[in-house]
Image (cartoon, grey):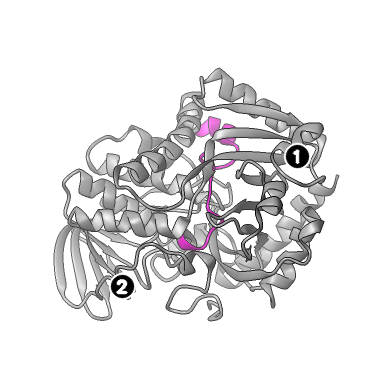
């Protein structure tokens, strides 16, 4: 059961909603429609799948249970970070080294897709390049050194630079870190405006978008039939993009993705001398711990501070009360700064931290489980699905060779079991 404080039928009271640039409302489905492709889910995965297919000339219907960008796509931290999944080398036995290399390169391509889409459709989403990973301990620095060496080896086209402890104030006004890695090929974005802008682009190409149109039944077959309370869609192909909110759509997909709470607070706008101390280069940043902090500046120079990934399935009593001490630890001089917004939502976690992209049937596709790195990976997943529908199968075949385990225990036990398992990884962060 979703917490109604953070999951009413309308958007949450967030900084993103307060500053959205796009206000188009889409109708509720109230008829029977026949189409080539039906997409379920109005987040970044669903919207971009519809857009990719519309660009290729397909007739597409998109169904969203609430509002476009209502879920994680419109609630996340806005970090646009290269990479697909976590630790691609772990899949070498199933996809081979060529498959690992292909996934790694898709992780770079994914950010370029976002940049090109924003430019092509003139999407007003505060896109700004510049990002840095932050290290707390020597093993983090070893990871960053290896990451930079790999980027150099593949001819990464953007500036990267390792930072030592004495360099850190160039990027972040905190003494908590021993080093970092600047990556000018990653950055940050207003994610709700990105999603809404891409939806308007899809709409302009003929995609029929319906909001307040929750899918209540799917009949698989030669031509799937997708039913809502007031209408239905019959399609040649179906794409399911429910991610953390896939519960009730398909039992197999639901069993492989775990909803986990993620939360963000936004300060009041900071004076120039303050924000220039906090993040002097206006970069997005993340630390490398399991229970990580991530933060960035908004266009009007608020600090958007996120973290607190919660696997228990329960929202904290107070998002500010729980996240503000983390912010104060990083930036003690912001202790008296006012917090204007607090919000949260569910992200989809997979057991192996690799996005799940594939087919349930020959004509039924899905994309989900971005594990907190979905802004770019959603765009890549959408492109892979569109490629497969148009006959380019190679990249989909790589994703379909990756095994994704079901979380045991059913809906009632998945969250507590993962919460217990994460304690082990958080203990490792201490040492």
Front label number (1 vs 2): 1
Of residue 406 and residue 182, the one placed in the foreground of this image is 182
Does the magenta portion include 91? yes
Q: Earlier in the sequence, mark 1 or mark 2?
A: 1
Q: Are marks 1 and 2 in contact (CB under 8 Å)?
A: no
Instruction: Please tell me in which quadrant of the rendered image residue 161 appears.
Output: top right
The residue where tag 1 is placed is 169
Rounded to the nearest angstrom, the CA distance separating label 1 from label 2 is 54 Å
The residue tagged with tag 2: helix, strand or loop? strand
Region in magenta = 74-94
Q: Find residue 384 and report its horizontal and vertical position in percent.
A: 35, 41
Q: The C terminus appears in which quarter of the rendering?
A: top right
Q: Find residue 306 and report its horizontal and vertical position in percent.
A: 64, 58
Q: Find residue 110 and report its horizontal and vertical position in percent.
A: 43, 39
The residue tagged with tag 1: helix, strand or loop? helix
Of residue 112 and residue 36, the one placed in the foreground of this image is 112
Asked if residue 290 shows in the view, the reply is no
The residue that appears at 44% across and 34% down in the rendered structure is 106
Does the magenta portion include 188? no
Asked if residue 44 shows in the view, the reply is yes
Q: Find residue 425 and report its horizontal and vertical position in percent.
A: 75, 50
35 w.r.t. 425: above or below: below
Is 198 left, or right, of 281 in this rendering? left
Is 68 left, or right, of 317 in this rendering? left
Label 2, residues with CA under 10 Å away: few <14, some 14-19, many ≥20: some
Label placed on residue 217: 2
Number of numbered labels in the structure image = 2
404 w.r.t. 83: above or below: below
The residue that appears at 38% across and 73% down in the rendered structure is 66
Is 196 left, or right, of 156 in this rendering? left
260 w.r.t. 297: above or below: below
């Amino acid at each position: 059961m979703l917490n109604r404080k953070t999951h009413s039928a309308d958007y949450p009271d967030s900084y993103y909603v307060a500053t959205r640039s796009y206000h188009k409302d889409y109708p509720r489905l109230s008829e029977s429609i026949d189409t080539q492709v039906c997409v379920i889910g109005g987040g970044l995965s669903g919207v971009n799948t519809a857009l990719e297919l519309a660009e290729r000339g397909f007739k597409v219907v998109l169904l969203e249970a609430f509002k476009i960008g209502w879920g994680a796509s419109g609630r996340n931290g806005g970090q646009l970070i290269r990479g697909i999944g976590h630790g691609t080398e772990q899949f070498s036995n199933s996809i081979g080294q060529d498959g690992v290399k292909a996934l790694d390169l898709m992780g770079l391509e994914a950010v370029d897709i976002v940049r090109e889409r924003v430019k092509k459709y003139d999407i007003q989403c505060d896109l700004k390049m510049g990002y840095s990973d932050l290290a707390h301990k020597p093993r983090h620095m070893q990871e960053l050194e290896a990451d930079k060496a790999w980027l150099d080896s593949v001819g990464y086209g953007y500036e990267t630079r390792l930072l030592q402890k004495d360099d850190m104030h160039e990027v972040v006004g905190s003494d908590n870190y021993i080093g970092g890695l600047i990556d000018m090929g990653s950055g940050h974005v207003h994610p709700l405006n990105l999603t809404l802008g891409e939806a308007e682009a899809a709409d302009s190409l003929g995609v029929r978008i319906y909001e307040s149109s929750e899918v209540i039944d799917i009949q698989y077959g030669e031509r799937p039939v997708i039913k809502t309370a007031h209408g239905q869609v019959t399609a040649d192909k179906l794409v399911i993009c429910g991610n953390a909110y896939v519960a009730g759509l398909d039992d197999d997909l639901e069993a492989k993705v775990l909803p986990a709470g993620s939360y963000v607070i936004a300060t009041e706008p900071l004076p120039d001398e303050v924000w220039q101390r906090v993040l002097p280069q206006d970069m997005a940043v993340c630390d490398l711990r399991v229970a990580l902090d991530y933060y960035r500046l908004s266009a009007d120079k608020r600090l958007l501070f996120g973290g607190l990934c919660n696997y228990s399935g329960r929202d904290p009593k107070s998002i500010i009360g729980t996240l503000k001490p983390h912010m104060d630890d990083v930036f003690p001089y912001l202790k008296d700064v006012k917090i204007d917004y607090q919000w949260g939502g569910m992200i989809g976690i997979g057991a192996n931290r690799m996005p799940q992209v594939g087919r349930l049937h020959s004509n039924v596709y899905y994309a989900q489980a971005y594990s907190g790195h979905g802004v770019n990976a959603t765009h890549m997943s959408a492109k892979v699905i569109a490629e497969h529908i148009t006959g380019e199968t190679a990249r989909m075949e790589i994703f379909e060779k990756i095994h994704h385990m079901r979380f045991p225990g059913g809906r009632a036990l998945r969250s507590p079991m993962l919460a217990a398992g994460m304690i082990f990884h958080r203990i490792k962060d201490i040492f």
